[in-house]
Amino acid sequence: MTGVEELYRQFGILADAGESAGEHSDEYSAILAAVKGTLGEKKLASSFITRFFKYFPKLQEHAIDAMLDLCEDEDNLLRKQAIKGLPELCKANVEHLPRIADVLTQLLQSDDVLELGIVKNALVSLFKMEPKGTIGGLFSQILSGEEQVRDKAIKFLAEAVAEFAKKTLHPSPETEEYLVDEIKKALSDVTGEEFKAFMTILSQLKTMQGSPQVLADIVTEQAELCQPFQPTDVDSIDRFISCARQAIPFFVRGASADPFFSYLIKQVVPQASQLTQAEDGEDPKLEMLKLCAEMSSCTLPEETIKAAVEPLFSLLLEYMPLPPSDSEDGKPTEDGTEPKLQFSYVECLLFAFHQLARKDEAFLTGADSTERLKDFRLRLQYFAQGCQMYIKQLRVALQGKAGAALQEKENKIKVVALRTTSNINIIIKVKLAISQG
């Protein structure tokens, strides 16, 4: 009798026994041993192991080991068959699920597209069956696995949460809290992209949807705001900008922006002149000023607002020059050269100052602010003139442009510039009206 025929005989004994199949452990053990046999024997063993797995609790660890051996076999079709069978083992005994999820997570690094699809489908089956155990298996690799596996595990988790959170996670606060705890462990050592992925996952949890402050606190801790800002350190700049961008949606939902905004005012603004354009063309100074503007309308304590008005105002004045005056000999200064207007910087600073000054009106209208207000009005009027001239030039340049023409790089830049200068013009009109009234 060949090995294949013997396997069919053992299968027949177990099948005929029905619910009493567990009394035939010798036959099941023989099936387990067949994973070391020929390819035909292995294929049958893979099918038979899962079929009768639930009847042999004492042999289940051995059976799992046998199936995992098949998942590493040289034969592509056999591997796929074995991987498909792994979720069936968990249906029989969910206690094995974390271990099997761990193994499937490791298999996410497969280069075979079809095999990878089967692995993902198997993990999805486990996630639907018992999300907490599946999360445990994924994080066993995220926390201590190889970098390639870790990356794929995080991506799979993000996809699974996005697609199945409402059905599998939202009904179970305990599972969501477990996921939060595991993510917090992983945050001790993450790349920027991994951090974004984890924050996206956290934002989709039901337990977190009413807790913007908790999410903001997680980002704040990651930003390392206790460390001095290093304006020449690219990593320091990138970390702050990335974390701040992640935090702003939580500020909009009511979380306090104070830690980030105070850091901007105390650490970044005084060193803004040292922020220079990066090699890739990014302008970190502009990014910082954009953050300032966005946070200025978020929840901030009164003392923070009052402490921020003067530093922002001083920086704003650096980019809002006074009208050029004649020199002593009657000739225009600098041979008639007018100052270059930094519209993007001014848009951010003017908006932020406008937001804060509304809550600290005495800064411009107090009894001791007469000279400051007079000086500021001159700067506003001069900048408004330059702004209006530029707006006219931009409108002429864009006249008649539509559709594909507006998508050209040069025209896109002009559209953004027109929006920027128009915004500045609106705020200047408001500030001038306030200063005169």
Image (cartoon, rainbow, N blue to C red):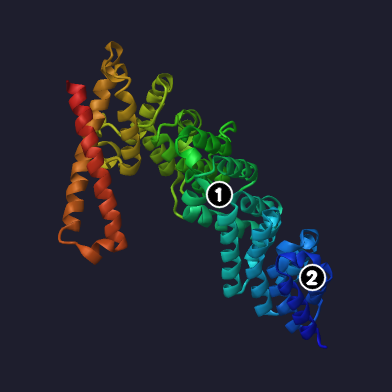
Can you see residue 427?
yes
What SS does tag 1 mark?
Answer: helix
What's the distance in space between the residues labelled 2 and 1, CA to CA? 50 Å
**Does the residue at mark 2 contact the one at mark 1 (Cβ under 8 Å)?**
no
| Relative image position of residue 414 (x, y in whole percent) | 26, 54
Q: Quadrant of the N terminus?
A: bottom right
Q: Find residue 173 and report its image quarter.
A: top right
Whether 30 is drawn above or below 170: the answer is below
Q: Nearer the viewer, residue 173 or 426?
A: 173
Q: Find residue 325 and report its image quarter.
A: top left
What SS does tag 2 mark?
Answer: helix
Of the two numbered discs 2 and 1 on the same chain, state the one appearing first in sequence.
2
| Relative image position of residue 291 (x, y in whole percent) | 41, 39
| Relative image position of residue 170 (x, y in whole percent) | 49, 45
Q: Position of 168 compared to 70: left or right?
A: left
Q: Nearer the viewer, mark 2 or mark 1?
A: 2
Whether 359 is drawn above or below 107: the answer is above
Can you see residue 330?
no
Mark 1, Cα crowd under 10 Å, few <14 / some 14-19 / many 20+, is few
Residue at (40% x, 35% y) in the render = 253
Q: Quadrant of the C terminus?
A: top left
| Relative image position of residue 19 (x, y in whole percent) | 71, 65
Mark 1 highlights which residue?
A: 192
Mark identifier at residue 28: 2
Badge 1 amino acid: Gly
Badge 2 amino acid: Tyr
Mark 2, Cα crowd under 10 Å, few <14 / some 14-19 / many 20+, is many
Whether 285 is drawn above or below 38: the answer is above
How many numbered markers are drawn?
A: 2
Mark identifier at residue 220: none
Whether 424 is drawn above or below 117: the answer is above
Q: Position of 12 compared to 199: left or right?
A: right
